[in-house]
């Protein structure tokens, strides 16, 4: 019998990608975004969205110290992170629709609601204290040779371990032995009709997205590129089922490190991409390096914020970008988590300001690895070696857990 050849349509639309494939595509698109627009981030517009909602409700939030007139100046098409966040939702939605797998993923218990509420608030507070989520403070920071990204990675991992234990003890629903209500079985004709409708809706969204992207060319020249890049990242994350939170949570909770290893590969790919960007900006000899070193500030605020964020991400069922991707899939839990993620980011603003007044909690100084190690060569070698050693350690961990 002749083997049926896999078509490009099946590869791009129907067949689920591996975690590594999705992670590598995401890394390449993130490097492109950094090269032509700016580093990928998620947190920035969330407190602004919360403030805009308060303004709509008649509250003069723009006069608050944490906003100081920024709400009046906010424009969606001029805010890269806002565009990317919305694009993540539609990228994930289109991925589901073209594969005829989109559906509303409902709430199964009250515990799930409470996990989304508490997790969302903790994510928002942790991200503002840090400041930054797992994208801006880790995935965009480590390839950019910022030591703060490594600190965030370690502390969020520890927070995810704690979050996993809290989730298992307090928020996972008890095992039920009751028979579930039978689902309505669709006829083959109904299933075919559902597939056709979903694919058509997905195709219509792509066309609408293209039209919208070209329509923004005059008012915001870079918006179109960001719209397509964010859409691609959302598509890749959903189509591969890649999840940052699972990369931190699963090694301890389930023993699986497949997503963890995919994340490490993505960080290595992004590191190689960022080398060219930074050499073009700062010169091989770092002659154009600004007085303030690139990268996030290191201090106790970073440790506390990333640890709290790690707990929140596990409870909420998704990290910052994962929340937007799951919303695109139709997850009601993550829709709830987003609302309280925004609320938490507003609560975290005053906390961050208070921490910045304390030299003990907030140093304000970043550490740029090429500057610390005397050039790009040692920094690249050290970073890639560290990622390789972590990949080997993760692989050994999985083997040992498998034997036990």
Image: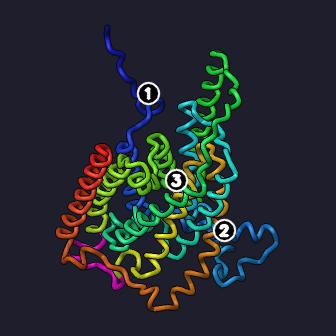
Q: What secondary structure is marked by label 1?
A: helix
Dots 2 and 3: beta carbons under 8 Å? no
Image-based side of 176 in relation to 380, left or right: right
Dots 1 and 2: beta carbons under 8 Å? no
Dots 3 and 1: beta carbons under 8 Å? no
Q: Main secondary structure of the magenta part?
A: loop
From the image, tell me which residue sits under label 3: 322
Image-based side of 302 in relation to 172, left or right: left
Measured Cα–Cα span from mark 2 to mark 3 = 17 Å
**Viewer-proximal residue, 334 or 374?**
334
From the top left corner, tell me how far across and down residue 91 is, in percent: 53, 45
2 or 3: tag closer to the N-terminus = 3
**Viewer-proximal residue, 34 or 51?**
51
> In the rendering, which numbered label is found on residue 117?
none
Q: Residue at x 42, y 51 (%)?
A: 250
From the top left corner, tell me how far across and down residue 294 is, in percent: 36, 76
From the image, tell me which residue sits under label 2: 343
Residue range (magenta)? 281-292
Q: What secondary structure is marked by label 2?
A: helix
From the image, tell me which residue sits under label 1: 10
Residue mark closest to the camera, 3 vs 1: 3
């Amino acid at each position: 019998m002749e083997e049926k050849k896999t078509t490009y349509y099946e590869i791009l639309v129907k067949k689920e990608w591996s975690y590594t494939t999705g992670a590598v595509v995401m890394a390449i698109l993130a490097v492109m975004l950094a090269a032509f627009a700016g580093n990928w981030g998620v947190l920035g517009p969330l407190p602004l969205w919360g403030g805009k909602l308060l303004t709509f409700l008649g509250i003069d939030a723009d006069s608050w110290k944490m906003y100081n007139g920024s709400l009046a100046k906010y424009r969606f098409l001029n805010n890269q992170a806002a565009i990317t966040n919305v694009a993540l939702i539609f990228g994930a939605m289109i991925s589901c629709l073209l594969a005829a797998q989109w559906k509303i993923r409902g709430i199964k218990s009250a515990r799930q609601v409470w996990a989304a509420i508490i997790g969302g608030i903790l994510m928002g507070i942790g991200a503002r204290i840090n400041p930054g989520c797992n994208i801006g403070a880790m995935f965009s920071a480590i390839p950019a040779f910022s030591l703060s990204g490594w600190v965030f990675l370690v502390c969020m991992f520890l927070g995810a371990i704690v979050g996993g234990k809290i989730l298992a003890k307090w928020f996972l629903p008890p095992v039920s032995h009751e028979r579930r209500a039978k689902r309505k079985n669709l006829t083959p004709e109904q299933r075919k009709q559902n597939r056709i409708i979903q694919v058509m809706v997905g195709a219509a969204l792509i066309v609408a997205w293209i039209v919208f992207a070209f329509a923004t060319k005059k008012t915001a020249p870079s918006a179109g590129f960001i719209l397509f890049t964010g859409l691609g990242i959302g598509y890749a994350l959903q189509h591969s089922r890649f999840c940052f939170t699972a990369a931190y949570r699963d090694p301890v909770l389930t023993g699986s490190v497949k997503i963890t290893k995919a994340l490490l590969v993505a960080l290595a790919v992004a590191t190689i991409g960022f080398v060219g960007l930074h050499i073009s900006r700062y010169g091989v000899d770092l002659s154009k390096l600004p007085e303030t070193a690139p990268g996030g500030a290191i201090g106790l605020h970073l440790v506390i914020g990333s640890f709290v964020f790690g707990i929140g991400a596990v409870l909420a069922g998704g990290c910052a970008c994962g929340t937007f991707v799951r919303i695109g899939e139709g997850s009601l839990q993550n829709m709830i988590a987003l609302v309280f993620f925004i609320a938490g980011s507003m609560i975290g603003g005053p906390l961050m300001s208070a921490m910045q007044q304390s030299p003990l909690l907030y140093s304000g100084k970043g550490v740029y690895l090429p500057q610390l190690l005397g050039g790009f060569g040692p920094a690249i070698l050290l970073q890639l070696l560290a990622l390789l050693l972590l990949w080997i350690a993760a692989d050994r961990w999985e083997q040992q857990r498998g034997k036990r």
